[in-house]
Image (cartoon, rainbow, N blue to C red):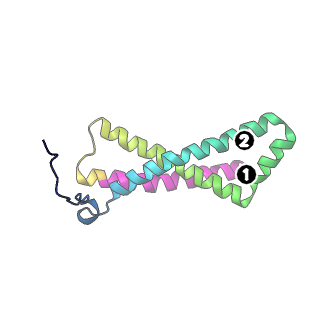
């Protein structure tokens, strides 16, 4: 029996780029995934700090100097925002897991609130840390 010949047909493209508009919930979903991935890098920062702490004063001084520099503080500030944003995004998902917040207004409010609250929490954490320091 001869093999059947299939006509060559281009695969359909996903319509998401042509149909869907960018929304707050979509943006926060993307940011939640990015911040989750970035937390792995932050875990590396914590590991570097712990190894330096265990290695003695010389190693710790070098790491403390770097994290005390402008670049180091900027990295730590961004990491703090990443941590706060991911945590609040997780709380937003928890609200959804218990069956709440699915109507349009609450979804948008939760998405905007995640971004706004993460910025506020980061600034508050750093303000308190600098005052206490």
Q: Mark 1 points at which residue?
A: 67
- Where does the image place residue 36, in percent across and percent down from the top left? 49, 45
C-alpha distance separating marks 1 and 2: 9 Å
* Residue 125 on the magenta span: yes
* Residue 71 on the magenta span: no
**Residue at (69% x, 53% y) in the render:** 130
- Where does the image place residue 66, in percent across and percent down from the top left? 76, 53
Q: Can residue 30 be seen in this view?
A: yes
Q: Name the residue under label 2.
A: 49
Q: In this rendering, would 43 be left or right of 67?
A: left
Q: First in sequence: mark 1 or mark 2?
A: 2
Q: Quadrant of residue 19?
A: bottom left
Q: Give the range drawn in magenta.
A: 108-133
Q: Residues within 10 Å of mark 1 (few under 14, many from 20)?
A: some
Identify whether 44 is placed above or below 113: above
**Residue at (30% x, 35% y) in the render:** 98
Q: Can residue 124 be seen in this view?
A: no
């Amino acid at each position: 029996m001869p093999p059947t010949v299939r006509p060559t047909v281009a695969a359909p493209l996903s319509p998401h780029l042509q149909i869907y508009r960018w929304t707050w919930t979509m943006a926060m979903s993307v940011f939640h995934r990015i911040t989750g991935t970035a937390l792995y890098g932050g875990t590396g920062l914590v590991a570097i700090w712990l190894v330096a702490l265990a290695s003695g004063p010389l190693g710790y001084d070098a790491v403390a100097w770097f994290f005390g520099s402008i670049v180091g503080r900027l990295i730590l500030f961004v990491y703090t925002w990443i941590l706060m944003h991911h945590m609040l995004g997780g709380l937003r998902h928890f609200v959804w897991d218990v069956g709440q917040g699915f109507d349009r207004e609450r979804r948008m409010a939760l998405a905007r609130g995640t971004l706004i609250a993460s910025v506020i929490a980061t600034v508050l954490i750093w303000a308190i840390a600098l005052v206490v320091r």
